[in-house]
Image: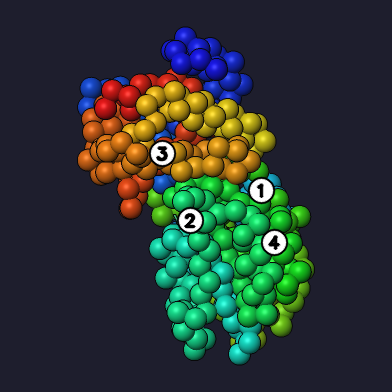
């Protein structure tokens, strides 16, 4: 690899996915240039087709009113089913193991209602130290809801002294050594702060061997990593669709529930009418008859406008294919890392693992040995004035996420240049 613009441009020319960038609106600076947008891990960009998909539903609602449930071009009654297959492909699941419903933290709670069933002896939850705040709040509130104390019921995984990321062997040994008291292992993947991806298969094997339930929060994993939820044998997973899946602010969430639970109607769950047998739902009976599979966890009839935006986005993933996106992503993040390392890295350190299989499309930086203003909010504002959108997260991290669908090798090259100047 080379540190020069012609080299970056050559990589762009050879990129088989380069045309996909044209399918997105790229935010513009005040003088009309494209921003270099490295914040797709926070909010993905808008696919140009979204407007058309959403407008179709607005038009059908205007024309048909309630009849749209049956006679819209895409009838609203079974509407959520239209995203199931694409979503299942993205997470490596069978279609009936997946449903799109609610928002992420809501689904995390619903899954814990089912899969966090603490007993007097086996009641602890394992999470990453410094997990995303919403996940921490959700987990702690579930622990309290069951009458336990987070101080004793929460095991927070910490990196070894002097290290920024967790090691798989340490996660596994924590589960093995405390398995008698652990009810649930819940990991984020990719870690939102460091960009680390874990060996989910290995960790799930350890959890299942020790009779612990295993869940994943894939907010930063879906649309980023190649996922194999069914084969990894995790019990459940949840994710959102507004980060790498580009379904718009407040976009819906997906849930995965493994096949082995699909017909287990003994499992406790919070029920609603959309989870009820479709053939008798409108008989308005009083006995809940849950659907098989993940659909049986639905509560409400879903928001069609958000689903329309998601349909537009998933259609792009179907054409681009996750394996190809991941191949480009590894190159793009690899090039970003290479360029950053070619600068004076004493001003900052890279906290993201350097092994491609252990990270998503993200490089996180922290202030290094020499004092610098990297890792401050002011630095991120300065970057924005130079046409780069990235983000700052407490304490002292900046996150750069080159997204294979719409970022280029030239983006990454220019961003490294500006990092150098600043
Ligand atoms: C983005 C993110 C969330 C956000 O939750 P919402 O319920 O969608 O607001 C939660 N957890 C993780 C790990 C995230 O990355």
Quarter of the image with the N terminus in it: top right
How many residues crowd mark 3 within 10 Å: few (<14), some (14–19), many (20+)? some
Structural distance between the alpha carbons of marks 3 and 2: 16 Å
Q: Position of residue 99 (x, y in %)?
A: 62, 60
- Camera-nearest label, 2 or 1: 2
Mark 4 or mark 3: name the one nearer the start of the chain: 4
Q: Which residue is the site of mark 4?
A: 204
Structural distance between the alpha carbons of marks 2 and 4: 25 Å
Q: Position of residue 102 (x, y in %)?
A: 50, 63
Tell me if residue 226 comes above or below residue 29 in the rendering: below
Q: Position of residue 308 (x, y in %)?
A: 50, 48
Lateral position of residue 328 relative to residue 406, left or right = right
- Residue 227, numbered label: 1
- Camera-nearest label, 4 or 3: 3
Q: Which residue is the site of mark 2?
A: 161
Lateral position of residue 235 relative to residue 402, left or right = right
Mark 3 or mark 1: name the one nearer the start of the chain: 1
State which image quarter holds ligand 1.
Answer: bottom left
Is disc 1 placed on a helix, strand or loop? loop
Q: Which residue is the site of mark 3?
A: 349
């Amino acid at each position: 690899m080379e540190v020069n613009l012609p080299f970056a441009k050559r990589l762009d020319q050879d990129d088989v996915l380069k045309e996909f960038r044209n399918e997105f609106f790229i935010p513009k600076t005040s003088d009309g240039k494209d921003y270099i947008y490295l914040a797709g891990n926070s909010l993905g960009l808008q696919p140009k087709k979204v407007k058309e998909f959403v407008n179709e539903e607005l038009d059908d609602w205007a024309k048909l009113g309630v009849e749209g449930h049956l006679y819209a071009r895409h009838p609203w009654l079974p509407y959520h089913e239209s995203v199931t297959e694409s979503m299942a492909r993205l997470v490596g699941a069978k279609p009936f193991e997946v449903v799109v419903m609610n928002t992420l933290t809501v689904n995390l709670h619903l899954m814990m209602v089912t899969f966090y069933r603490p007993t007097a002896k086996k009641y602890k939850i394992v999470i990453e130290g410094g997990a995303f705040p919403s996940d921490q709040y959700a987990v702690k509130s579930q622990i309290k809801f069951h009458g336990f104390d987070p101080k004793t019921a929460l095991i927070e995984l910490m990196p070894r002294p002097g290290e920024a990321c967790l090691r798989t062997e340490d996660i596994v040994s924590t589960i093995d050594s405390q398995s008698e008291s652990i009810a649930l292992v819940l990991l984020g993947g990719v870690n939102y702060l460091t960009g680390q991806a874990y060996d989910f298969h290995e960790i799930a094997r350890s959890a299942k061997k020790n009779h612990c339930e295993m869940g994943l929060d894939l907010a930063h994993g879906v649309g980023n990593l190649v996922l194999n939820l069914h084969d990894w044998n995790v019990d459940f997973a949840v994710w959102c669709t507004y980060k790498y899946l580009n379904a718009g602010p407040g976009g819906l969430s997906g849930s995965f529930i493994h096949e082995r639970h699909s017909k287990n109607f003994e499992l406790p769950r919070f029920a609603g009418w959309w989870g009820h047998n479709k053939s008798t739902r409108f008989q308005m009976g009083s006995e809940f008859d849950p659907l098989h599979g993940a659909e049986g966890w639905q509560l409400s009839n879903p928001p069609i406008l958000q689903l329309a935006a998601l349909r537009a986005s998933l259609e792009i993933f179907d054409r681009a294919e996750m394996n190809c996106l991941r191949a480009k992503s590894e190159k793009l993040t690899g090039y970003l890392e290479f360029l950053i390392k070619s600068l004076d890295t004493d001003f900052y350190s890279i906290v993201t693992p350097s092994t491609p299989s252990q990270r998503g499309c993200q490089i996180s930086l922290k202030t290094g040995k020499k004092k610098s203003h990297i890792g401050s909010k002011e630095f991120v504002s300065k970057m924005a004035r130079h046409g780069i959108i990235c983000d700052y997260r407490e304490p002292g991290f900046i996150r750069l996420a080159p997204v294979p669908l719409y970022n280029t090798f030239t983006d990454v090259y220019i961003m490294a240049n500006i990092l150098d100047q600043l």
